[in-house]
Image (tube, grey):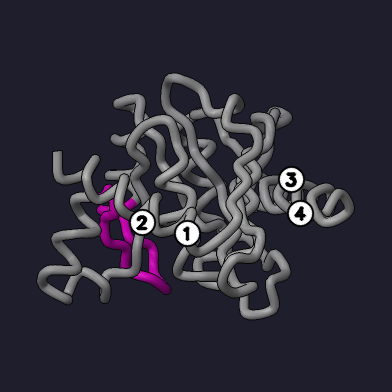
Amino acid sequence: MVYHTIRAIVKFYLHLRFRIKIEGIEHIPKDSCILAMNHTSNYDPILVGTHTPRKMYIMAKEELFRIGWFGRLITEMGAFPIKRGQADLKSLKHSLKLLKDGQIFSIFIEGTRSKSGEIQEAKKGIGFIAARSKATVIPTYIHGVNNGWFKPAGVVFGPPIEFPDGLGHEEIANLIAEEIRKLKQQHDSDA
């Protein structure tokens, strides 16, 4: 009940603030999947999370959970903590369990926001989670959220990525980043 109420309020606010366009929602499967996303703004997780067909779970830096009410709120909305800059086995195990249970798990492949707006090098963690879980990976491009009030913004969910056999974690991560870059390039050329 709390989740659905907050989601509806946030979605209403986002549609007031931006001219939102969501593309490719049909690519999100009914079972488990990984939304592998770029990251440029604090709006990114709520923009994507309010437009997925069901609850989305996402890693968030552990510092956010130290703010009492805010930590409880984002936990209710599907966020769970990760210790950045190190291999956080607890968060990785939680991610794999979510996927095993058929959930939507999302992750910012760069690990932090890109100040330039360009898609940075992907962290190996996304390659590990994709390889270990064998879940469908949906490249997800978020755009326009830094352009100000009433400007176009949105999300492009791309088709699932097919991975050749024998790729290592870093190669998988690089392939995912490349697919998001292709979505960006296609979106920017159509805009």
Question: Looking at this rendering, what residue extends furthest in the bottom direction?
Answer: 115
How far from the left and from the top, in percent, is residue 3? 21, 44
Rendered residue at 51%/58% (across/down): 108
**Which of the two discs, 4 and 1, sits closer to the camera?**
1
4 and 3 marks in contact (CB < 8 Å): no
- Label 2 to label 4: alpha-carbon separation: 23 Å
How far from the left and from the top, in percent, is residue 44? 49, 60
- Structural crowding at the residue carrying mark 4, measured as other residues with C-alpha within 10 Å and reported as few (<14), some (14–19) or many (≥20): many
Kind of residue sitting beneath label 3: Glu
- In magenta, the rendered stretch is 77-91
| Residue at image mark 4 | 184
Question: What kind of element bears circle 3?
Answer: helix
Classify residue 30 as left or right of residue 9: right
- Label 3 to label 1: alpha-carbon separation: 30 Å
Q: Relative to 92, is 53 above or below?
A: above
Q: Quadrant of the N terminus?
A: top left
Say which label, 4 or 1, has the lower sequence index: 1
